Amino acid sequence: MKNVIGLWASTSKSILKSAFVAMIAICMASCAKDEVSGEEIEIEAIEAEEIEAEVSLAATSLPRDGRYYIKNPASGKYLGVQGGNTTNGSNVVLWEKSGNPDQIWGLESDGNNPGQFWLFNWNAEKSLDVTKRSTQNGTNIQIWGFSNAPNQKWILEPLGNNEFVILSAQGNHTECVDIARRSTSNGANIHLWDWAFGANQKWVFEKAD
């Protein structure tokens, strides 16, 4: 009888031990599954954000040749020629929308260089121009008679949400139309600066027709 009881006790302990081990294994597997599931959810969320960004970028098509107001979304103000001047070397500045022709720019694609554009001031009939063909940060942007030089050609790089960076076609295509000191004031100067993803370097083309 003692042998039977001893065998039963030993067997019970073995069964309980096996059950306990099995419970731990199930728990570990469940936790691992939850962790993997969490990682999968996080990865799916990241992929969704990337897809959304790609869709937004794809939706931002290049504007067609035509007449535009060029707006900085951060300030709500526009590119224009200071004082409405029409002479070579007249300064380009930021100004609230006036509807005057010095804020209207003609966009024309360069058929010999796909992806490059000229920007003509409608009032002055002169080109948006980088002074003295410099590629240095802080170089002034002005209007000048058409010369077909690289410092008068521009590349529109889409950023999504119908926003663009306006890159100079000269040099390494890394400098862009920039509002000096990130100002949002009327009369803020427009110059050349390295593209740095700044709000003062983003532009929207609004049809003027």
Image (cartoon, helix red, strand yellow):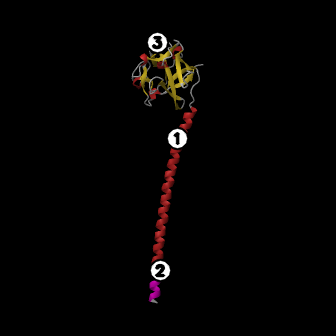
Asked if the residue at tag 2 contacts the one at tag 3, i.e. Cβ–Cβ closer than 8 Å, the answer is no
Residue type for callout 1: Glu
What type is the residue that disc 3 sits on?
Gly
Please identify the residue farthest to the front as the structure is shown.
112
CA distance separating discs 3 and 2 = 100 Å
**Residue at which label 2 appears:** 11
Q: CA distance from mark 1 to mark 2?
A: 58 Å
The boundaries of the magenta stretch are: 2-9
Query: In this orientation, does residue 84 appear?
Result: yes
State the residue at coordinates (45%, 81%). 9
**Residue found at x 46% / y 84%:** 7
Where residue 115 appears, as percent x and y from the top left, is 54, 26
Residue at which label 3 appears: 83
Residue occupying the point 50% across, 57% down = 34
Q: Nearer the viewer, mark 3 or mark 2?
A: 2
Crowd band around label 1 with a 10 angstrom C-alpha radius: few (<14), some (14–19), many (20+): few
Q: Secondary structure at mark 3?
A: helix
Residue 8 among those drawn in magenta? yes
